[in-house]
Image (cartoon, grey):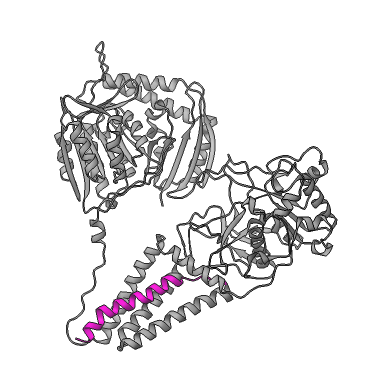
């Protein structure tokens, strides 16, 4: 799996330095790491770039610029250009080796391997930063499969209506060719495999706009003259009399993006201005030349890039390969390898050439084996068909499952089986004190949130006299205790039984997080974040995570984990970790789930998660004894209900909307919601029961166990269809096997808490039976 590295450079300048944020993640997943650092002030960097740029632009070579004047006082040599380039490279690497930037450098080298495929996105609006040759950073040169792309800090994903095409549709605009050769570009495009290229030679603005509106283009190509003016506005020259800015093509280009435009290539000069304006149109990928480009360099880059891209390399690897191959031209055209640059929309993932057309799908369809045409089939032939059909079906089915197409079905089946489990007893080790809507309204007028300082002070004072083992406050308090309640502040600060809650920030959902109570020390905090599935149901138990540095909540463990660890400590049980990273609580040892676990395929398995084994009740809120706040404050709480228990305080008032969906259904068939305090109690009970009562956690087989299981049912379906001749018998037999599969899946879930692949096995059973009926039966009856 590829890696995505994002370097965000904040708004500033070279005179003041730049704040920098590094994020590292697997492709298509949330960042697994985020740290911040700074690049110190260094006004010398833009001066060095300007010196190199001035020399480079005065070199005499046939290029594709218009409107970039060349001074004629003294023509510099290629050696002068190379010296300026070497000086810029030295100054850049010296800057990136600064002590204030070292944490990013060290974390990069620690978390990324030289063989990783790495996309590096440099997010900044500063044009001077974008112009720098970032590919010369000595850290990047250690990674042969890494490439840098530029991107804007602001971006969004555009919903595209792009039906599959039999061939890649390319619109090639051959603009003003005065003084340059763009026929070579057209010849390269003409032989592109699996492509249907339409050439517009020196079109009028109306012809170009009509093509953008009327056709579904996947790649847009421009060859000719272009330039960036003093206001950093990009401009292309489409014929000898007309030039267009991107804003003048805005509506046509926006329509092209909506219809499926994936890539724009500007094989012309000084294209950063074009790319910056294209960013507002949210084109997925753009390739431009950062400076004036010689004719031959432009042609060779296009040839090398399309060869690598069309043979299956990713866009980033293809650009790097083509860019590095330009080094052979640098004796004639200095710094040719600096010119090509990718401008990426971060909301989209890089495309592959084979994803743009249908031919690769047609070529990968497994041919149906020919069957003999003579009357009757020998036993060996039928058995061969059974084995082949079962293997092909299993391989295709597990592949489809791996990409998540069966996940929603598997979760529905899983939820249904959970609801069929027998009812369990409440967990008497937990007491829930709920703040109802009536409790909220009954408190003083100076209340903040659902629980006023006065009520919390009285509640904690009364609970402490009954000696609970630990108290958990599942209510956000991102504000200090009022001055009139010093004892409450002391209890929260010094109480060895008290644990409070906060919320970790989430950059993907733009949730800023919620600060913890200022009085509570860090070791007495737990986060409230939960792992929520795409259908908004909570089926996973988030135990621990690494909060981002910018999060106001830095608690590494969940609130429920903190409460359980304190409870178990008095039982002589402490949390340990095995050498392979598994958790160990006494005799209980378990490993966090991965991205592909059971019916989950491609989930965000951030931090440490396990499957949530709900304690089964018709009403999930019956997990433990509970009492309202007013009942406690009026003396209706018996001491033995508190002593040596986990006391969990939380709100159930509907006005605070702290509710979550669960796999259990109400009598009306709708998903049952429970208040957050009861969800925390379910998670507490799961860990306590597993560690002390040997109640098993939910678990799944490894991938090979699941493959063998599905393959076994595929073989059963094939055998039934191959050897049961009357169709009535076959129907009853297949139905009986479906019931057997369902019974086995339910029994394993009830007795051993094992979640096995029911849906893939059922599909394999039915699919292979149908396939064998359509292939073998007609031949047997011929």
Residue 317 picture quarter:
top left
Residue 749 picture quarter:
bottom right
Q: Residue at x 74, y 67 (%)?
A: 428
Q: Is residue 321 among the parts visible in the rendering?
A: no
Along the line of sight, the residue nearer the viewer: 55 or 532 = 532
122 with respect to 465 (left or right):
left
Residue 634 picture quarter:
bottom right
Q: Picture coordinates of residue 196 (x, y %)?
A: 18, 47
Work out which quarter of the rendered image holds the C terminus and state it. Answer: bottom left
Q: Is residue 104 above or below residue 722?
A: above
Along the line of sight, the residue nearer the viewer: 579 or 664 = 664
Q: Picture coordinates of residue 5 (x, y %)?
A: 45, 42
Q: Picture coordinates of residue 723 (x, y %)?
A: 31, 86
Q: Report the magenta residues as a range.
A: 753-782
630 with respect to 709 (left or right):
right
Q: Residue at x 50, y 79 (%)?
A: 743
């Amino acid at each position: 799996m590829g890696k995505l590295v994002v370097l965000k450079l904040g708004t500033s300048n070279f005179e003041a330095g730049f704040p920098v944020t590094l994020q590292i993640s697997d492709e298509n997943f949330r960042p697994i790491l985020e740290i911040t650092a700074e690049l110190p002030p260094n006004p010398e960097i833009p001066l060095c770039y300007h010196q190199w740029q001035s020399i480079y632009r005065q070199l005499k070579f046939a290029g594709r610029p218009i409107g970039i004047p060349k001074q004629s006082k003294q023509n510099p040599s290629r050696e002068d250009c190379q010296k300026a380039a070497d000086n810029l490279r030295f100054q850049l690497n010296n800057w990136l080796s600064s002590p204030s930037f070292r944490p990013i450098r060290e974390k990069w080298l620690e978390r990324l391997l030289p063989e990783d495929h790495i996309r590096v996105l440099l997010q900044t609006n500063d044009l001077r930063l974008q112009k720098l040759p970032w590919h010369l950073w000595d850290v990047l040169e250690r990674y042969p499969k890494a490439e840098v792309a530029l991107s804007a800090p602001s971006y969004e994903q555009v919903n595209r209506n792009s039906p599959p095409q039999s061939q890649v549709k390319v619109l090639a605009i051959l603009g003003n060719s005065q003084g340059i050769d763009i026929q070579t570009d057209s010849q390269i495009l003409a032989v592109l495999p699996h492509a249907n290229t339409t050439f517009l030679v020196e079109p009028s603005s109306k012809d170009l706009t009509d093509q953008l509106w009327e056709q579904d283009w996947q790649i847009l190509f421009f060859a000719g003259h272009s330039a960036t003016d003093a206001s950093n506005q990009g401009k292309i020259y489409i014929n000898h009399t007309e030039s267009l800015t991107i804003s003048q093509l805005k509506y046509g280009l926006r329509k092209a993006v909506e219809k499926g435009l994936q890539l724009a290539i500007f094989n012309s000069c000084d294209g950063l201005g074009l790319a910056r304006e294209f960013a507002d149109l949210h084109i997925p990928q753009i390739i431009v030349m950062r400076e004036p480009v010689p004719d031959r360099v432009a042609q060779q880059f296009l040839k090398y890039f399309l060869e690598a891209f069309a043979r299956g390399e990713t866009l980033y690897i293809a650009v790097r390969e083509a860019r590095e191959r330009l080094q052979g031209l640098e004796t004639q055209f200095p710094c040719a390898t600096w010119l090509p640059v990718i401008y990426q929309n971060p909301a989209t993932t890089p495309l592959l050439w084979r994803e743009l057309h249908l031919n690769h799908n047609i070529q990968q369809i497994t041919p149906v084996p020919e069957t003999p045409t003579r009357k009757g089939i020998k036993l060996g032939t039928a058995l061969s068909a059974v084995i082949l059909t079962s293997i092909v079906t299993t391989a295709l089915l597990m592949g489809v499952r791996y990409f998540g197409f069966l996940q929603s079905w598997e979760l529905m089946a899983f939820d249904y089986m959970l609801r069929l489990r027998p009812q369990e007893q409440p967990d008497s080790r937990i007491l829930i004190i709920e703040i109802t809507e009536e409790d909220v309204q009954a408190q003083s007028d100076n209340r903040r949130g659902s629980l006023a300082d006065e009520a919390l002070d009285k509640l904690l004072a009364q609970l402490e006299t009954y000696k609970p083992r630990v108290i958990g406050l599942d209510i956000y308090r991102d504000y200090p205790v009022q001055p009139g309640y010093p004892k409450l502040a002391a209890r929260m600060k010094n109480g060895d039984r008290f644990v409070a809650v906060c919320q970790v920030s989430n950059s993907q959902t733009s949730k800023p997080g919620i600060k913890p109570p200022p009085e509570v020390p860090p070791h007495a905090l737990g986060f409230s974040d939960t792992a929520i599935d795409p259908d908004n149901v909570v089926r996973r138990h988030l135990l621990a995570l690494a909060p981002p540095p910018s999060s106001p909540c830095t608690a590494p463990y969940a609130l429920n984990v903190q409460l359980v660890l304190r409870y178990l400590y008095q039982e002589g049980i402490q949390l340990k970790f095995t050498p392979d990273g598994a958790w160990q609580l006494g005799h209980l040892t378990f490993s966090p789930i991965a991205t592909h676990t059971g019916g989950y395929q491609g989930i965000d398995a951030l931090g440490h998660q396990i499957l949530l084994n709900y304690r089964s009740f018709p009403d999930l809120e019956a997990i433990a004894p509970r009492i309202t706040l007013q009942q406690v404050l009026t003396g209706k709480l018996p001491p033995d209900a508190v002593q040596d228990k986990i006391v969990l305080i939380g709100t159930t008032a509907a006005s605070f909307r702290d509710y979550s969906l669960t796999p259990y259904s109400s009598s009306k068939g709708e998903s049952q919601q429970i208040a957050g305090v009861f969800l925390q109690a379910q998670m507490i009970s799961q860990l306590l029961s597993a560690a002390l009562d040997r109640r098993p956690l939910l678990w799944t087989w490894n991938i090979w166990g699941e493959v063998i299981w599905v393959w076994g049912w595929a073989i059963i379906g094939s055998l039934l269809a191959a050897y049961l001749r009357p169709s009535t018998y076959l129907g009853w037999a297949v139905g009986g096997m479906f019931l057997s599969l369902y019974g086995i899946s339910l029994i394993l879930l009830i007795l051993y808490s094992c979640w096995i692949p029911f849906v893939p096995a059922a599909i394999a059973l039915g699919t292979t039976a149908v396939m064998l009926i359509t292939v073998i039966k007609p031949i047997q009856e011929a």
